[in-house]
Amino acid sequence: MESRDYERILNAIPETGIYVVRQEDRAVLYFNQRIRQLAPQIRLGMPCGGLWGGSCGACPLKKAEEDGSAGAAVYGESFAGTADITAVKTLWEGTTPAFVVTVAPHKGDMRNAGSESSSEQERREAQMASVLRARFKMMNTVYLDTGVCERISLGTGAHQDTVVVGDYSSYIEKALNGYVHPDDAKNFGETLSLEHLREKAQQIQDYSEEVCVYRQRGEPVRWIELRVIYTRSGDRVVANILGQDVTREKSREESSNKALEERAYIIGSLSSLFFATYYVDLERDSFRTVTQQRRVGDVLGDEVSCSAALQIYANHFIHPDDREEYLKVMNAENMVQKLRWWQPYLAVEYRKLADEPDKGMDSWSWVRATVMLARSGAYDMPKTAVYVAQDIGGRWREQR
């Protein structure tokens, strides 16, 4: 197929009619709503000869039988002028030799004030086709009124641009029974069933997307992403499904998740060493609690600002003589200015007051607070850090 056909698939142009005829006897195997409008007399099984008012002499089927595809500009009253008819050899239901025939308004009859030049339009269409081929390997157009599906291979090689027309529900059933991993079958079936597509189409105003990611059976594991694109034109909605292999992306995601789990395990294992651990987002001046003492949590409450939380903590839990030094080091602005890969941490020691307020200022223990660089961004600027606090004073002691 040509690049303009990819645009048709993506945008579901309603002016394009599609029908399928068997190669052996030219019997009509399928036709869409637009063809019914152009040729009300059409019926399944009837020969296609003379369908367009005696224009068989210009029909491209004979040339398509020899060359694989062909096109012609045909004049007829049904088109109210001239139409472009294109025929492509295919396999109906994967087994029956047939032709997919498209009928569209002739380019020379289309008027659009201010439209691009034909060369510019062709350039844009070629760019679109190139982008589609680079990202996706398969395109499926589902006609929701009939349940018929057109499958177009976007890969390179012998099967490039191969079109297969068949029953969409049969494709889904075959995929569930033979290709989709059992653990992903439920989500696959619910997202891609013809019933779901039809229900979703009723809710579409102009455009919507859904994504289904599943594993194929067998080893090594392969992940496939199917992107369902719903487009409305008037009363009609077409579902276009584009597929791509995302195994590499999923492998990176799994490796990243494993690293995060290992990091969380390490931090959890160190909970006996640090009585407080926080993740700090220096770009947003916010923090997230990993571990903290209950009373500290009660005092901080729902506070999410890192700067505000450090000030509250100092006012309630740090000896008055040490608060200024603590806040000089432990504030978001100082962290942003000083944390770098060549200076990956900042630390300060202070006297932490006893949890029981009635013991007063004479009951305390020495604590070391350390903030460590976790992730940097552009120009080595810190983005996130980890704050930990460790008791280094042994037993609580009361000065007399």
Image (tube, grey):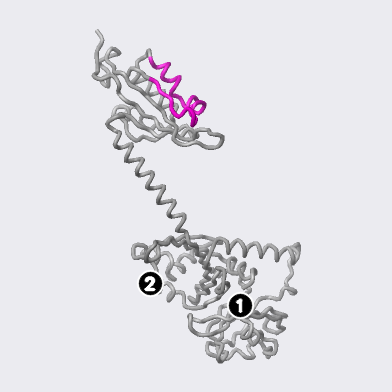
Tell which tag, 1 or 2, sits nearer the viewer.
2
Q: Residue 154 vs residue 275: left or right?
A: right
Q: Residue at x 56, y 85 (%)?
A: 21
* Percent x, y of residue 79: 68, 81
Is residue 115 among the parts visible in the rendering?
no
Circle 2 Cα neighbour tier, 10 Å, few/some/many (<14 / 14–19 / ≥20): few
Residue to which mark 1 is pinned: 17
Q: The residue under label 2 is which amino acid type?
A: Gly
Q: Which mark is residue 178?
A: 2
* Percent x, y of residue 253: 43, 51
The image quadrant where one finds the C terminus is top left
Q: Residue 395 vs residue 369: left or right?
A: left
- For the magenta stretch, what is the residue range? 322-348
Residue 372, by quadrant, is top left
Does residue 262 belong to the magenta stretch? Answer: no
Against 47, residue 307 (above or below) is: above
* Residue situated in front as seen by the camera: 39 or 247: 247
Q: The residue under label 1 is which amino acid type?
A: Gly
